[in-house]
Image (cartoon, grey):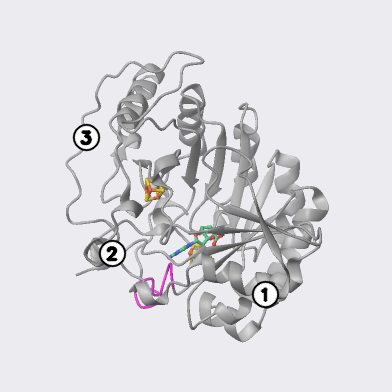
Amino acid sequence: MNAIERIIPITVAPAPTFLAATPAAPGEALRDTRGRAVRDLRISITDRCNFRCVYCMPKTVFGRDYPFLPRNELLSFEEIERIARAFVAQGVEKIRLTGGEPLLRHDLERLIEQLAKLPVEITLTTNGSLLAKKAQTLKDAGLHRVTVSLDALDDAIFKRMSDVEYAVSDVLAGIEAAAAVGLAPVKVNCVVKRGVNDNQILPLARHFRGSGQILRFIEYMDVGSSNGWKMDEVLPSAEVVARIDAEFPLAAIGANYAGEVAERWRYVDGSGEIGVISSVTQAFCGSCTRIRLSTEGKLYTCLFAQSGHDLRALLRSGGSDTELTGAIAGIWRARGDRYSEIRTAETAGAKKIEMSYIGG
Ligand code: SAM
Ligand code: SF4
Ligand code: SF4
């Protein structure tokens, strides 16, 4: 099997013919087959990354010769902006730029300037390694907030997770710079892999408690097909909460908005809050309002999808804005995804799209 076959499922559906669906009228929510509205658009702007996190882009698969997408395959900023505008017209309230590592995309600030004209919140998820340098220009371009991934405070464990030579201090400097320029509150995401970095839960909690930044722990997921996921490597969020609660008592708090994926807990002594994202042990498909646009313009209605809908083909064959909005409406109305609710050992082993391509 070559690397391309690994990333693009062999079972890819034939090029979709889009239903000429009627777009949702202004003010009317576009709903899928389970009554969920479309609210969050995640856009992967590059499939490349300067990290090789073992749970996302292991070097055994994403090695030196890995065939990343050539430039002409990527959506241009103008194409991204057009698709984003169509989604906003259909009810999207939040756009998250992701990847791969989004800060590697050349001239990213120009894209953010365009997107910031839309009446939505613009956020970005990054590994933080280049953030100290870029925080100010991102803020000036109109970015509202950032989420930074950080899986350990200890350099050796950080390296075991990210498999690169960057230091924890590079990421911490990025987080501080983001907070200082007002990309706040910064959310800090830690993927927990049992037996690898779960001994970092308390050091991370101690570090970020009282800082104003919101630390969140994510259950290790079976995204893609290359990370060799096993259920016994998942540390349930309930255990994360129990470990922190034993040192710093916690109390549950409500969601900020309907469909929020993180379950929130506050420190009883008033020193801030943490979140846990339990996509494996407590699926939240019932309130999933997210849709993902891949680097090359395919639309995925679920993180665990096996195929996508080629919006780039529609745009590059001269499709009008009305056709684009109609295609989006047709795709969302037909959506019935609930992968995390029906996950089994068999589905976990099935071929799926890689997270670095579809966007986290
Ligand atoms: N490179 C950026 C970063 O790491 O923040 C953005 C892209 S990354 C794919 C987005 C998020 O997905 C990160 O927070 C990462 O930790 C998370 N992620 C990747 N693989 C995962 C997995 N197998 N299980 C849970 N979360 C994962
Ligand atoms: Fe890169 Fe982010 Fe994936 Fe790590 S999680 S390999 S930083 S895309
Ligand atoms: Fe949404 Fe799919 Fe995740 Fe369920 S498994 S929460 S439908 S992205």
Q: Nearer the viewer, residue 226 or 296?
A: 226
Residue 23 in the image: above or below residue 37 = above
Three-letter code, disc 3? Pro
User: Residue 113: x, y in percent?
Assistant: 65, 36
Nearer the observer, disc 1 or disc 2?
Answer: 1
For label 2, the SS is helix
Residue 18 position, x and y percent, is: 25, 27
Above/below status of 211 relative to 195: above
Label 2 sits on what residue type? Ala
Quick check: can you spot residue 163?
Answer: no
Label 1 belongs to which residue? 246
The correct choice, above or below, for 194 with respect to 143 in the image is below
In which quadrant of the rendered image does the N terminus lie? bottom left
Q: Earlier in the sequence, mark 1 or mark 2?
A: 1
Q: Is residue 178 left or right of residue 337?
A: right
Quadrant of the rendered image containing residue 241: bottom right
Asked if residue 59 is among those painted magenta in the image, a careful observer would answer yes
Relative to 106, residue 223 above or below: below
Q: Residues within 10 Å of mark 2 (few under 14, many from 20)?
A: many
Q: Which residues are magenta?
A: 55-65
Q: Earlier in the sequence, mark 3 or mark 2?
A: 3
Q: Which residue is mark 2?
A: 348
> Which of the 4 image quarters holds residue 151?
bottom right
Badge 1 or badge 3: first in the primary sequence: 3
